[in-house]
């Protein structure tokens, strides 16, 4: 293996599956139980805000009962000890990477534990419900919504992500189906920039052919083994 200095890691719902958080597209996953257009679009929110707020209130409450698993722990260990640049880009809106101790986490699809005020544009840490239309801690308006990126909205910090993809020698995708863009396109971006690409997933993702290497299995087993390898242990 050539010398690796800069790493970009992309994670998805599969990394939190073994912590008991539902994925989206698996059998029995969230998008089988709920229509995406109803709960994950600005139009759905405008049509039926109560339904949407209740859905995210339940998710926000649920994740607070969950714990990081060995995949989160291993990534936090890598983040803490890696000498080069490391950016952990997650599509997940839970906080399990942080709770495992990772510092360099970028939530491109937002975070359950934030509320976003559409009146003053400030984001506030939030653990309780939003269904009761609480006032924004900054401006006092009752205009808080989940700080989650919905379909049709722009994911966060794309410039920073593409800059990291341009500089990385290794791109690793973990626990994501590769169904949602722009994240699903990161592997090709990294590859075009000369990075080696590795996929760790339970099953081949939709973009599996773009990876130099694919390892199939549960994240709690694959990720610690891979982290040991990279750290030369
Ligand atoms: P998906 O539910 O689409 O895909 C999860 C992937 O994880 C699948 O390929 C599974 O095979 C794999 N998986 C399941 N359990 C696993 C395990 N224990 N170990 C390893 N892999 C496992 O979730 P995402 O790809 O994260 O966006 O979905 C991307 C985005 O679509 C989400 O961020 C969300 C959703 O709509 C928004 O809500 C904006
Ligand atoms: Zn406000």
Image: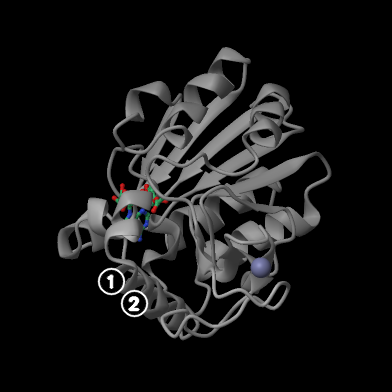
Locate residue 25, reporting x and y percent: 24, 52
Locate residue 184, reporting x and y percent: 42, 33
Residue 224 visible, this angle: yes
Name the residue beneath numbered marker 1. 51
The secondary element bearing badge 2 is classed as helix
Q: Residues within 10 Å of mark 2 (few under 14, many from 20)?
A: some
User: Is residue 176 rendered to the left or right of residue 95?
Assistant: left
Q: Residue at x 47, y 83 (%)?
A: 129
Q: Residue at x 49, y 34 (%)?
A: 198
Q: Classify 71 as above or below 6.
A: below
**For the residues bearing labels 1 and 2, Cβ distance under 8 angstroms:** yes
Q: Nearer the viewer, residue 209 or 99?
A: 99
Q: Nearer the viewer, residue 111 or 5?
A: 111
Note whether ligand 1 is within 8 Å of mark 2.
no
Q: Quadrant of residue 131?
A: bottom left
Q: CA distance from mark 1 to mark 2?
A: 5 Å
Q: Residue at x 60, y 80 (%)?
A: 135
User: Is residue 78 rendered to the left or right of residue 208?
Assistant: right
Locate residue 38, reporting x and y percent: 24, 57
Q: Classify 138 as above or below 109.
A: below
Q: Residue furthest right?
A: 83
Q: Classify 48 as above or below 203.
A: below
User: Is residue 78 rendered to the left or right of residue 10?
Assistant: right
The secondary element bearing badge 1 is classed as helix
Q: Classify 173 as above or below 18.
A: above
Locate residue 106, reporting x and y percent: 65, 50
Q: Residues within 10 Å of mark 1 (few under 14, many from 20)?
A: some
Q: Nearer the viewer, residue 121 or 82?
A: 121
Q: Quadrant of residue 76?
A: bottom right
* Image quadrant in which the N terminus is located: top right
Q: Residue at x 45, y 53 (%)?
A: 222
What mark, if any, has residue 54 been given in the picture?
2
């Amino acid at each position: 293996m050539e010398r690796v200095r800069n790493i970009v890691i992309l994670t998805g719902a599969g990394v939190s599956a073994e912590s008991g958080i539902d994925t989206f597209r698996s059998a029995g996953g969230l998008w089988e139980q709920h229509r995406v257009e109803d709960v994950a679009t600005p139009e759905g929110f405008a049509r039926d805000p109560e339904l949407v707020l209740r859905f995210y209130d339940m998710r926000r409450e649920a994740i607070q009962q969950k714990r990081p698993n060995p995949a989160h722990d291993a990534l936090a260990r890598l983040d803490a000890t890696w000498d080069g640049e490391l950016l952990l880009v997650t599509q997940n809106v839970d906080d399990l990477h942080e709770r495992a101790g990772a510092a360099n986490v970028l939530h491109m699809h937002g975070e359950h534990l934030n509320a976003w005020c559409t009146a003053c544009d400030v984001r506030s840490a939030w653990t309780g419900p939003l269904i009761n239309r609480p006032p924004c801690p900054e401006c006092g308006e009752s205009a808080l919504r989940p700080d989650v990126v919905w379909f049709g909205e722009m994911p966060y910090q794309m410039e920073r992500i593409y800059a990291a993809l341009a500089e990385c020698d290794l791109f690793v995708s973990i626990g994501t189906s590769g169904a949602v863009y722009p994240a699903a396109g990161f592997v090709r971006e990294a590859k075009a920039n000369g990075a080696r690409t590795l996929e760790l997933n339970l099953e081949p993702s939709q973009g599996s052919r773009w990876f130099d290497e694919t390892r199939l299995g549960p994240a709690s087993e694959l990720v610690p083994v891979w982290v040991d390898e990279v750290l030369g242990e």
